[in-house]
Image (cartoon, rainbow, N blue to C red):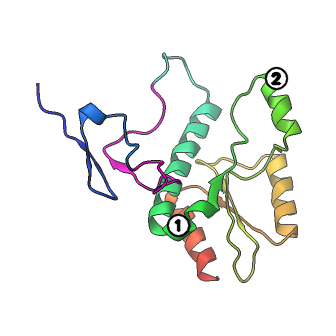
């Protein structure tokens, strides 16, 4: 049996061997790296595969959007580590049981809020609201309402369909600081 290649931490070049396959506490999510900027080369992301069932087009698009968004966050935190705390996701989507959905509504969860917000003002805007869309995905009516409200109060609203779109928008936005 071939010897497994260890995962190497990009930030501190420490090896993560099989003995420590799930133990990254010395560098990941620690006090030194609370936002998880440290990434592993060769580490796969996401949950384990569920038993096979046919997925809907909407589910596939959400999965694609989620992967694009995860890539955008990784690239952002590597390129602009000084703003790592200021870019965050708004977990509005997903299926919820009725009680959890009710409690989240009481806590202020709103439909249509963007997938991510960059909470850094520039010369023209208070923040950058980022909606991720895959393929020919379109905004819902709630998303259009949120866009109008966000822009009314001085925020920039963008739709990104790829990591390149994201980098173009964020670079432009931060250039105006």
Crowd class of label 1 (few under 14; some 14 to 19; many from 20; radius 10 Å): some
- Labels 1, 2: front one: 2
Residue 151 horizontal side relative to residue 45, left or right: right
In the rendered structure, find residue 94 and report the number of the disc placed on it.
none
**Sequence-first disc among 1 and 2:** 2
Quarter containing the C terminus: bottom right
**Residue 108 image position (x, y, % from top left):** 85, 44
Tell me which secondary structure the magenta stretch mostly adopts: loop
Hey, which quadrant is residue 24 in on the image? top left
Residue 175 horizontal side relative to residue 127, left or right: left
Residue at the image position 75 percent from the left and 75 percent from the top:
125
The residue that mark 1 highlights is: 167
- Eyeballing the image, is 138 above or below 117? above
Quarter containing the N terminus: top left
Residue at the image position 57 percent from the left and 68 percent from the top:
83
The residue that mark 2 highlights is: 98
How far apart in space, not on screen, are marks 1 and 2 (Cα)? 37 Å
Q: Specify the farthest residue to the left.
A: 1
Q: Secondary structure at mark 1?
A: helix
Q: Secondary structure at mark 2?
A: helix
Residue at the image position 61 percent from the left and 39 percent from the top:
62
Tell me, yes or no, whether the highlighted magenta stretch contains residue 80: no
Residue sitting nearer the eye, 22 or 57: 22
**Residue 175 image position (x, y, % from top left):** 59, 81
The magenta segment is 27-48
Tell me, yes or no, whether the highlighted magenta stretch contains residue 43: yes
Residue sitting nearer the eye, 97 or 55: 97
Residue at the image position 58 percent from the left and 45 percent from the top:
65
**Residue 14 image position (x, y, % from top left):** 26, 51
Hey, which quadrant is residue 131 in on the image? bottom right
């Amino acid at each position: 049996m071939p010897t497994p290649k260890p995962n190497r931490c990009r930030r501190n070049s420490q090896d993560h061997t099989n003995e420590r396959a799930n133990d990254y506490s010395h560098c990941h999510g620690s006090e030194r790296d609370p936002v998880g900027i440290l990434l592993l080369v060769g580490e796969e992301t996401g949950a384990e595969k569920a038993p096979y069932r046919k997925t809907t087009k909407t589910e596939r698009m959400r999965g694609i959007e989620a992967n694009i968004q995860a890539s955008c966050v990784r690239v952002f935190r590597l390129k602009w580590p000084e703003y790592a705390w200021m870019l965050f996701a708004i977990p509005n989507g997903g299926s919820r049981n009725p009680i959890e959905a009710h409690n989240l509504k009481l806590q202020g969860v709103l439909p249509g809020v963007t997938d991510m917000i960059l909470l850094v003002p520039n010369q023209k805007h208070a923040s950058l609201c980022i909606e991720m869309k895959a393929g020919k995905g379109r905004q819902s009516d709630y998303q259009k309402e949120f866009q109008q409200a966000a822009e009314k109060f001085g925020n920039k609203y963008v739709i990104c369909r790829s990591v390149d779109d994201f980098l173009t928008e964020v670079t432009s936005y931060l250039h105006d600081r």
